[in-house]
Image (cartoon, rainbow, N blue to C red):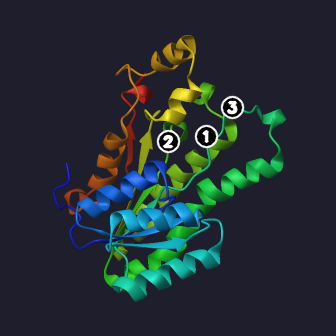
Amino acid sequence: MPNGRLEGKRALVTGAAGGLGAAIAARFVADGARVLLGDVDRARGEQLARDLGDRTVFVTLDVAAPPAWNKAMEIAATAWGGLDVLVNNAALASPIVPIEQRDPADWDRMMAINLGGPFLGARAALPVFRAGGGGVIVNVSSVAGLGQSGIMDPAYACSKAGLTMLTRIIAAQHARDGVRCNSVHPGPIDTPLARATYADTETLAQRLSRIPAGRFAQVEEVVAAIVYLASEESAYVTGVALGVDGGALVQ
């Protein structure tokens, strides 16, 4: 439940116009943060900003474009005087496409968004954090970045595995700058999209059999982990890959 754990924080959430990103943004606002909503979907992003109120500002943000990141940092500086938290949530997903069938251009696009985006975000945010005395990066990854390789799309899994290592590198190399960096690794989240993906009973049962908890995650459970890592409650936590997966990775 919201409890003001992010009071006074200035955050940027990417992929904020819908789905998990919108839920993250709403919870951050409820917990006292001001949130820069970054997304390529201007119409939905601006509507979300209206819905969430005057503690939010929308910015058109293509995470694969360095100039867009520079603009986002300028807006954060102008609106709020800086930034405290970056949540790299924007990502592309994919059903399993075998390596020999994957179009190289699609592979490159997946890497550009899922791994290049957080790299560019960190690259833009680190000087801002350093100037402000520190900051927090939360990278939204996936169980695909840590294991379950046999049932994951190669391009998606490789992009998320790279994000896991990027998280550790940022944590190790920038701790003395007052910067913490952690990643969250959800398993399947109970959304209409996930239910459509596992529409037939047999497919759903097969997927659930790989999750010891026997169910998909609720959106709120994933958001709660992100709030924890963004808050001062995790002040001594950095370089961690936090699974929110019902035990899927311990099988």
Q: Which residue is mark 3?
A: 96
What is the quadrant of residue 239 in the picture?
Answer: bottom left
Q: Amino acid at mark 2?
A: Ser
Q: Which percent across, then down, holds residue 191? A: 46, 35
Q: Decide: marks 1, 2 in contact (CB < 8 A)?
A: yes
Residue density around tag 2, few if under 14, some if 14–19, many if 20 or more, within 10 Å:
many
User: Which residue shows up at 16% across the image and 56% down it?
Assistant: 3
Name the residue that disc number 2 marks: 142
At a point 28% along the width and 68% down the height, the residue shown is 33
Q: Earlier in the sequence, mark 2 or mark 3?
A: 3
Residue 190 vertical placement versus 139 (above, below): above
Identify the mark nearer the N-term, 1 or 2.
Answer: 2
The residue labelled by disc 1 is 157
Q: Tell me how far mark 1 sits from mark 2, CA to CA.
A: 8 Å
Instruction: Say which of 198 and 46 sits in front.
Output: 46
* Left or right for 68, reference 7: right
